[in-house]
Amino acid sequence: MNADVLFKPFSHPKLELANRIVMAPMTRQFSPNGIPDAAVADYYRRRAEGGVGLILTEGTTVPHEAASSAVEIPCFHGAALDGWQRVVEAVHGAGGKIAPQLWHVGSTRKPGTGPCPDYPSASPSGLIRPDKKVMEALSVSEIERLVKAYTEAARNAVDLGCDSLELHGAHGYLIDNFFWEGTNQRTDKYGGSLVKRTRFAVEILESIRAEIGDDFPIILRFSQWKQQDYEAKLAQSPDELAEFIEPLSAAGVDIFHCSTRRFWEPEFEGSTLNLAGWVKKLGGKPTISVGSVSLTEEFIATYREGVAEVAGLEELITRMDAEEFDLIAVGRALIANATWPQMVKSDKADDLRAYDKAMLTELV
């Protein structure tokens, strides 16, 4: 197996990376009172030392009262910024690059949780899933506050010396609540057609660009699947997918992070291209693919079964050799193996450890 394609430099006008391997964002909840400590800095430093080209941090919340569902989830504002400064310095000191994932959990936040338990959770239409309304729809004034919150967090990323930032617009969280018809039934400018449902994200992107300029790279993570419905699709066809990504690209997305549970699965009938492959083909901008890299089981199965064994990389290498997508995000395999890139590069993939969900109890 020749894995050289994984170690080709990635060259973008706004972002240069030593290789094509990205650490996928994974919520760990090891930040006391939302502040990442030395253990968090060491955790990310070890992955940088292990050869990851770009680290996408775990979801770190924007400055809004309902953004977080647990006090151990890191924030990206206030007192937490000193902690993130140490993380950035640790990663850079190890020769790595890092981008915070800016997050608001949206309607997935259960009432009474997080650092502001009395504040109402945020949902475009008050829906936590299709046909289940449990809260009030967001007012336009609150939406405007949320846009400012994302913008403030983006400014923080620039000021801390981060190399990029990622907006979390996937998996049934706030931005995705607006994307998905199942949770967005608004009749104003933020709802309606697929394109109109991108309006909230577009306003965030436009506001961030106005604040930080055009030279800082922005990644957007999105998904077809939702926690509320793993078979959901924002776009039913390539034509709909093109309609969806166009306004986001125009508003300032540089790289699309296309979240799937299994990277090898085709997105639409009649083609072997996965979601990242289709987005690259339709929009022309670089894409990150993700989903069960070097593991036999996707993440939902490991919650049940506990273990995912090591899988081969032949399919991944074939797709990357074909330039189907530009970067590949590795998640659970990097929890199990902090030096995953080095091991693959030195032809020691057979020595990789399997992933066990028990590993989530420690930050190592």
Image (tube, rainbow, N blue to C red):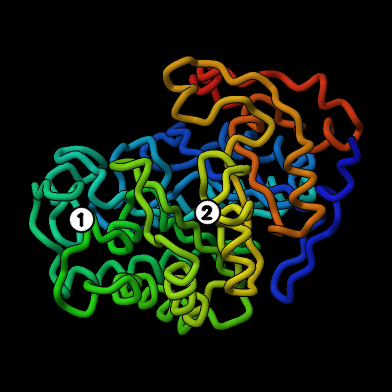
Q: Are marks 1 and 2 in contact (CB under 8 Å)?
A: no
Q: Residue at x 52, y 60 (%)?
A: 166
**Residue 161 place in picture, x, y as percent:** 63, 63
* Residue kind at label 2, given as amino acid type: Glu
User: Disc 2 marks which residue?
Assistant: 269
* Mark 2 neighbour density, 10 Å: few (under 14) some (14–19) many (20 or more): few
Left or right of 290? Residue 119 is left
Q: Residue at x 73, y 48 (%)?
A: 21
Report the disc number at residue 195.
none
User: Disc 1 marks which residue?
Assistant: 122
**Residue 263 place in picture, x, y as percent:** 60, 44
- Whether residue 155 appears in this view of the structure is no
Quadrant in which the C terminus appears: top right
Left or right of 324? Residue 122 is left
Q: Secondary structure at mark 1?
A: loop
Give whichever of 312, 350 is nearer the camera. 312
Q: Residue at x 60, y 37 (%)?
A: 331
* Mark 1 neighbour density, 10 Å: few (under 14) some (14–19) many (20 or more): many
Q: Residue at x 8, y 47 (%)?
A: 134
* As drawn, 300 above or below 182: above
**Residue 290 place in picture, x, y as percent:** 60, 46
**Residue 255 place in picture, x, y as percent:** 60, 66
- Whether residue 207 appears in this view of the structure is yes
* Residue kind at label 1, given as amino acid type: Ala
